[in-house]
Image (cartoon, helix red, strand yellow):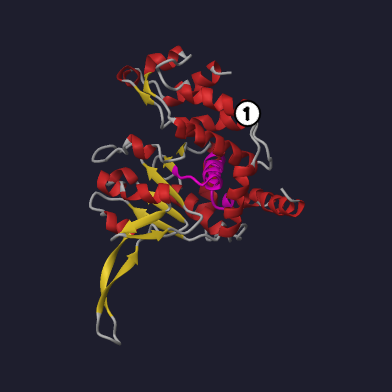
Amino acid sequence: METQELTHYKTLVAKLPSLRNEIGKVIVGQHEAVSEILIALLAGGHCLLEGVPGLAKTLMVKTMAEALDMSFKRIQFTPDLMPGDIVGTEILEEDHDTGKKFFKFNYGPIFANVVLADEINRTPPKTQAALLEAMQEYKVTYGGSDYPLPRPFLIIATQNPIEQAGTYPLPEAQLDRFLLYIRLNYPSEQEELDVLKSTTGTKRPQLQTVLTDQDIIELQSLTRQVHISDDLISYINRLVRATRPDGSPSAFVRQWCDWGGGPRAGQALVLCAKARAVLNGRFSVVPEDIQTLAYPILRHRIALNFRAEAEAVTTDQVVQELLKTVK
């Protein structure tokens, strides 16, 4: 890497703590969730955000987009939502000069840098599947034509873990497309007190733009250049392979799991570990990056068997045991 290019990258990386601070002006606490969303952004992936109502999931995503000066769209998923309501549709228009009629593609809300898919499990699989091509290919195909999505592009889908009546759980193939599965917890007592004080008055924080969409694209390029040793790649490979019951070194996995993560889980761990290094101002991956991100990367890529569900065993417990077993 050239000296001038390295200096430029270091300048961009130095702005990341300021980005966290700007988000912190609005979002009290939830530091881990904010970091994981930023990691997904730097790694060029998408997030599934799970939390009970009232934890500021929508506000968190909107605030991040504002601090990055990126376009933001929110889609409220409902049982009657159609794929065209997400990707767009063709409308018939008339040329006033010639009088001829033609079809024009009307862009849907998916065409934004940051898209919040709110309560994605409230819509049927047909509509959920409308996101698949966008998530993987960064384009939308309609009427035989391809429409590229803006870059950077980040989908953050939310789901409510409490109300499961009338919902449509995401199929495993689509779950695997999400780079991270982030769980939001209740704030601490002090954080909740700060929320009550800061959100019930007339004062509204003014956010400053810290990075632009072009800066994020450059940081995504830098993320892929971050160094990771062969030993750590081998560790990631062994960790992912250990999630699969057949041949797993962990008796815990063999007892409680039906199947584990595929190669995409390993790719996600490598990329996200690199992104976490960048977020923390480093240009090399350390074991802590992998161990911290193992939970949001693997928790939705491990399928528990019926016995595990009956005994209330969670995928996070499986990951915890794996981190103890795989050295």
Name the image quarter holding residue 227: top right
Residue at the far right in the pictured view:
3
Against 264, residue 307 (above or below) is above
Whether 241 is drawn above or below 20: the answer is: above
Q: Position of residue 159 (x, y in %)?
A: 37, 42
Q: Does residue 183 appear anywhere in the picture?
A: no
Which of the 4 image quarters holds residue 90?
Answer: bottom left
- Which residue is farthest bottom? 97
User: What residue is shown at x 24% (from left), y 49% (from top)?
Assistant: 79
Crowding near pointer 1: few (<14 within 10 Å), some, many (20+)?
Answer: few
Q: Is residue 10 above or below residue 161?
A: below
Tag 1 secondary structure: helix
Residue at left 56%, top 47%? 42
Can residue 66 be spotted in the picture? yes
Residue 298: image location, x then y, percent: 46, 30
Residue bounds of the magenta highlight: 23-47
Whether residue 213 sits left or right of residue 139 in the image: it is: right
In front here: 146 or 125? Answer: 146
Q: Quadrant of the C terminus?
A: top right
Determine which residue is flagged by label 1. Answer: 230
Q: Is residue 20 left or right of residue 91?
A: right
Q: Most prominent secondary structure in the magenta stretch?
A: helix
Q: How many marks?
A: 1
Q: What residue occupies the far front of the structure in this picture? A: 144
Amino acid bearing label 1: Asp
Name the one closer to the observer, 258 or 60: 258
x and y percent of residue 296 in the render? 48, 34
Q: Position of residue 153 (x, y in %)?
A: 47, 53
- In screen coordinates, is 294 left or right of 305? right
User: Does the magenta-highlighted stretch encompass residue 173?
Assistant: no
Name the residue nearer the viewer: 191 or 75: 75
Task: Please name whichever residue, 164 or 189, is drawn nearer the observer in this view of the structure.
Answer: 164
